[in-house]
Amino acid sequence: MGKTGAKLSSGNVFADLGLPNPEQEMLKARLTLQIYKIVKARGLTQAQVGEILGIKQPHVSTLMRNRAGNFSIGRLMEFLTALGQDIEITVKPTRKAHGEMSVVMR
């Protein structure tokens, strides 16, 4: 097989696109997806979600399209706790020159 010119993925689409802070963007995407899954599983309306999260409907609509918008990682975690989720943050030494962020969903 010859070269196809295809580039191998790093596993992070944000890094592959050359965007700044790719690990943070991936984390935001995963948190937003979890919010979406919880909302859909509970059959909540966007109005109900807005009440629970304390945000306006257009922002709920953005979240339901799996976009974090201007929400920070901290704010997304607050949304998850408002939806009845526990969040644990573990900080540990790395063997690499630079640490990395990840999310474990249960």
Image: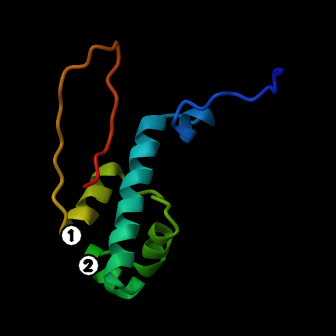
Does dot 2 land on a helix, a strand or a loop? helix
Q: Position of residue 4 (x, y in %)?
A: 81, 27
**Numbered label tally:** 2
Q: Which residue is mark 2?
A: 52
Q: Which residue is mark 1?
A: 82
Q: Residue at x 63, y 36 (%)?
A: 17
Please say if 38 is above or below 24. Answer: below
Q: Is residue 6 left or right of residue 93?
A: right
Q: Is residue 97 left or right of residue 94?
A: right
Which of 64 and 38 lies nearest the eye of the viewer?
38
Q: Which mark is residue 50?
A: none
Q: Is residue 84 left or right of residue 57?
A: left
Please say if 94 is above or below 88. Answer: above
Q: Position of residue 12 (x, y in %)?
A: 51, 37
Q: Residue at x 49, y 36 (%)?
A: 22
Mark 2 residue crowding within 10 angstroms, few (<14) / some (14–19) / many (20+): few
Q: Is residue 11 left or right of residue 102?
A: right
Label 1 amino acid? Ala
Q: Residue at x 33, y 39 (%)?
A: 102
Q: Residue at x 42, y 60 (%)?
A: 33
Labelled pair 2, 1 in contact (Cβ < 8 Å): yes
Mark 1 residue crowding within 10 angstroms, few (<14) / some (14–19) / many (20+): some
Residue 41 picture quarter: bottom left
Q: Which quadrant is home to the C terminus?
A: bottom left
Q: How is the image coloured?
A: rainbow
Label 2 amino acid? Ile
- First reached walking from the N terminus: tag 2 or tag 1: 2
Does dot 1 land on a helix, a strand or a loop? helix
Is residue 18 visible in the rendered structure shown here?
no
